Image (cartoon, helix red, strand yellow):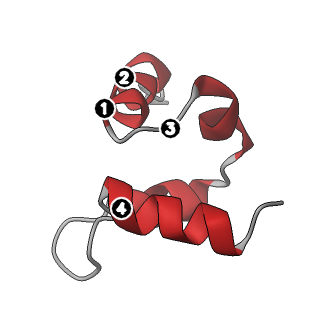
Amino acid sequence: MTAIPFDDWLCLALRLGLMPAAFWRLSLKEWRALTAIGGAAVLDRTALEALRARFPD
């Protein structure tokens, strides 16, 4: 079984502007959408803040 690189993922989340608490609340599907390369666009900080303002929960 391969270990999940949570430390690396958390560092990436911080670079994307996510606080640790927000990172730990993400589902795996949400994490994959945020970090997708190719098929789906990666959210930049402006787009993420717009989504957070629109969906504050």
- Are discs 2 and 1 less than 8 Å apart at CB? yes
Image-quadrant location for residue 56? bottom right
**Around disc 2, counting alpha carbons within 10 Å, would you say few (fewer than 14), some (14 to 19), or many (20 or more)?**
some
Determine the CA span between mark 3 and mark 4.
12 Å
For disc 4, the marked residue is 46
Q: Secondary structure at mark 2?
A: helix
Q: Nearer the viewer, mark 2 or mark 1?
A: 1
Q: Residue at x 60, y 37 (%)?
A: 23
Q: Secondary structure at mark 4?
A: helix
Residue 1, image x, y percentages: 49, 30
Q: Nearer the viewer, residue 36 or 43?
A: 43
> On screen, 40 above or below 23?
below
- Are discs 3 and 4 less than 8 Å apart at CB? no
The numbered dot on residue 11 is 2
Determine the CA span between mark 2 and mark 3.
10 Å
Q: Amino acid at mark 3?
A: Leu
Determine the CA span between mark 3 and mark 1.
7 Å
Of all residues, the one furthest to the left in this rendering is: 38
For disc 3, the marked residue is 18
For disc 1, the marked residue is 15
Of all residues, the one furthest to the bottom in this rendering is: 39
